[in-house]
Image (cartoon, rainbow, N blue to C red):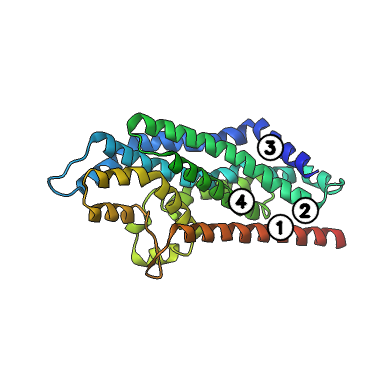
Amino acid sequence: MLKAMVLRNIKLYFKDKGMFFTSLITPAILLVLYATFLGNVYRDSFTSNLPDGFSLSQKLIDGTVGAQLISSILAVSCVTVPFCSNMLMVQDKITGARKDLTISPVSSAVLSGSYFLGAAVSSLLVCFTALALCLGYVRTIGWFFSGKDILLLSADIVLLVLFGTALSSMVHFFLSTQGQISAVGTLVSAGYGFLCGAYMPISSFGSGLQKVLSFLPSTYMTSLVRNHAMRGALAQMEADGVPKVFVDATRESLDCTVEFAGKTVTIPAMYAYVGGMVLVLLGAYLAVQYLAERKRIYS
């Protein structure tokens, strides 16, 4: 029954051209906007901070900037896309399909689980398509990725999509109108990129705001993607003789290095924290679904 419900949700998502293209067009538009407008800003900022009398090949500069661009796109898309793909949960309430499903033999646990899994699978398909587009773009300007980097980026995408799906499931549970869907979608699309440090590195914020954001999993999700997207380019800089102090400063300025309570957070610790938050959000989502079902039965 769970498999049938998951397949039903995936089919409905891809059948609804509005939801599908809204999800897919977001990373594509971001890639075009970043490459067209922010690319030159990032490039000028990077080259202006190079040590005096030191120069890098244009390919390495472009590859470094490209890696920064695609890490920002993926960090944002892997959370905003699930908010689009998970709209089916609310759409079923609006159309009355949810009421029909609750009086069918489908249990509450199967229903809530199918929404989560269906949204996760749909989001992964969109986000891996976005990854292919991003890697294709970097391939044309400066390629410094290894097979390991791509595998780690893929693992990051899976983790971030699971987080985005769990978060959107929790939020969408309380929505019941088309206006609420639009409001939440606009808020997440407009604000999340700044909150996670994708548009502006968190290291450029004030110390007080940095301390607040260090508690949020979005900070570490962006750092994971950025570490794995930029590892090859930064390693090539060191191989080309760029002073290590400059490379380390670049890592810190781009949030590859994140501190919590004055201590540098390791990559395994980032994975553990984000994974823990996924479990917490998923548990909370299943709990509110269970309580709502009990209330419906006994009311």
> Left or right: 216 with respect to 111?
left
Q: Are marks 2 and 3 in contact (CB under 8 Å)?
A: no
- Reading the image, the residue beneath label 4 is 168
CB atoms of marks 4 and 3 within 8 Å: no
Q: Tag 1's secondary structure?
A: helix
Q: Residues within 10 Å of mark 4 (few under 14, many from 20)?
A: many
- Whether residue 241 is situated above or below residue 284 in the rendered picture: above
Nearest the eye: 262 or 104: 262
Q: Where, quadrant-wise, is the C terminus in this rendering?
A: bottom right
User: Which sits earlier in the primary sequence, circle 2 or circle 3?
Assistant: 3
Q: Position of residue 77 (x, y in %)?
A: 50, 43
| Residue at the spot of label 3 | 10
| Amino acid type, residue under disc 4 in the picture | Ser
**Contact (Cβ within 8 Å) of mark 2 with mark 1:** yes
Distance from Cα at disc 4 to Cα at disc 1: 13 Å
First reached walking from the N terminus: tag 4 or tag 3: 3
CA separation, marks 3 and 1?
Answer: 20 Å
Report the residue marked by disc 2: 109
Which residue does the numbered mark 1 point to in the structure image?
Answer: 286
Distance Cα–Cα, label 4 vs label 3: 16 Å
